[in-house]
Amino acid sequence: MELGSLQLNGISWTVFRMGETTWLLQPNAEKGLLDVIHQAAFLLEFSEIQGLTDVIPAYESLTVIFSSSDINAKEVLSGLETKNIESELNSKTHEINVCYELGMDWKEMETKTGLTKEEIISIHSSQEYTIAMMGFLPGFIFLDGLDDRISVSRKENPRTKIPAGSVGIGGHQTGIYSLESPGGWQIIGRSPSSFFDITSEPPTQFRLGDKVKFVRITKTEFETRENRNG
Amino acid sequence: MGKLTVLDGGLFTTIQDKGRSGYRKFGVPASGVMDISAYKKANFLAGNSENAPVLECTLKGGKYQFNTDATIAITGALMNPGINDNGIEMNTSVKVRAGETLELGFAKKGCRAYVAIRGSWDIDKVMGSCSTFTLGKFGGLNGTQLKKGDQISWQEISESLETRTLQNDEIPYYSSKRTIEFIPGPEWDQLNDQEKDRFLNSSFRVSSKSNRMGIRLESEKPIAMNQVDMKSSGVIPGIIQLPPNGLPIILMKDGQTVGGYPRIGKILDIHLNRIAQVPINGTIKFKEVKDFI
């Protein structure tokens, strides 16, 4: 149910009550949506709002979950603003090794883009990407900044099993499967790195807004690094 | 130290508690028991704390040999529990002796039974919870369903417990035909009036593809919607998603944290318990809650 709007971090957000304890916030901004959402997510994280148990940042929305249905998001979030939030947003750059030879969908990628495998790899590995969101699966990383020339829609029949570390393309996004799981993205490579570790706190070293660069490695290098991890 | 050995883990038995929070921003689902009402009752009957882990048995419970004496309680789906082949009561605290075997059969009513064992279970918490998330392979015992040879141990509580039993009116009747109340979701108004009516007046069948991630529904007449390309956005247990095939999916406790399908509704939290007990091929109808706020 739509419940008007609230002001958060100097931006107006349309408020929708999605469940007893869950509220969906959508920024009324024309562009730079990701930045607006990331900054608000960090603001909520640092503000230690009582009863706020979860924040789910996504491409165009922020979902907030409270511990009780008595807490009204409009009341507790309205007017929150941190002038110095930018200082908390020092993003890191991560270099991620990818063995493109372990891609599973090269034929489909070549047919649908009209490019050769080498051209696609060159485009994919020359771009710097931004971590837009995490989710779907624990540690699954959605990256913004894919070159339109190598944007290919999801597979018609999703695979039942995709290995952990797989690098995929799904429409205008590229991303990394942190765990072995079913999935419908076009798989163009695999990284030997681990992307989700339940023994670490937090379980991922990646943060929203961080930059990612893919570094091509050979199959031999992949196997060496994978053994080291295992 | 109390201990049991799994002789047969049944169809799908996992260790669950209330679930985890605070990690959804990393894509970690809530997990936790599907029927929180039956879960709380089991822990109460066993004299445990409200957030203690239990066994969640799905459709067929399995066989468990107790290596030590224990106090247990079983709630939820009717699985004809027995100790050494003698039937025992559900919804009451029960003493088990060392060497005895607890067996739970096929669910005759309902879908999920809960077994609480008095004591503090020896299960490492992952991200604040003992709950098993099988897709992520973490939580519970090695992140998987219970299988033959697994062992569960617990610190015994020395204080004795007087037998606790639920009143008849505290024990729900698990019907295979249920009405589920929902509040309209963010994309509800993308359905036209005819399709809203179809959704509200259809009987949906629970598909055998349902699991802890989602209850998949089937119907002769799918719900049509002109789907616009939607960017992935936050979802929670209870959200009713409408994929392009027009067959709704109710996200459950192991459901993903974000989704790209229209969220036509969100079933009431108290009805998550209800839907968790509807068996495969059971039918449900949806009823809109209008005065929710």
Image: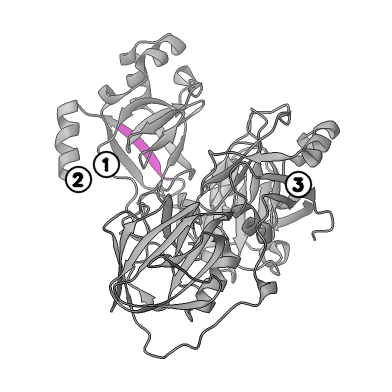
Amino acid at dot 3: Phe
Amino acid at dot 2: Asn
B82 displayed left or right of B224:
left
Give the camera-side residue of B284 and B32.
B284
Quarter of image, res A120: top left
What is the x, y in percent for residue B290?
A: 84, 54
In front: label 1 or label 3: 3
The kind of secondary structure the magenta stretch mainly shows is: strand
In front: label 3 or label 2: 3
Question: In the structure shown, which secondary structural element does the residue marked by tag 1 occupy?
Answer: loop
Provide the residue designation for mark 1: A193
Amino acid at dot 1: Ser
Residue B235 magenta-highlighted: no
Residue B131 visible = no
Provide the residue designation for mark 3: B286
> Residue at the location (54% across, 82% down)?
B164
B106 displayed left or right of A110:
right
> Residue at the location (39% across, 28% down)?
A127
Q: Which chain is disc 2 placed on? A: A
Q: Earlier in the sequence, mark 2 or mark 1?
A: 1
B171 displayed left or right of A217:
right
For residue A229, which numbered disc appears in the image? 2
Question: In the structure shown, which secondary structural element does the residue marked by tag 2 occupy?
Answer: helix
Q: Which chain is disc 1 placed on? A: A
Quarter of image, res B90: bottom right
Q: Which chain is disc 3 placed on? A: B
- Quarter of the image that includes the N terminus of chain B: bottom left
Please report the bounds of the magenta region as a residue range: A210-214
What is the x, y in percent for residue A197?
A: 32, 53
Do the residues under discs 2 and 1 have CB atoms within 8 angstroms?
A: yes
Residues at marks 3 and 2, CA–CA distance in whole angstroms: 49 Å
What is the x, y in percent for residue A156?
A: 51, 21
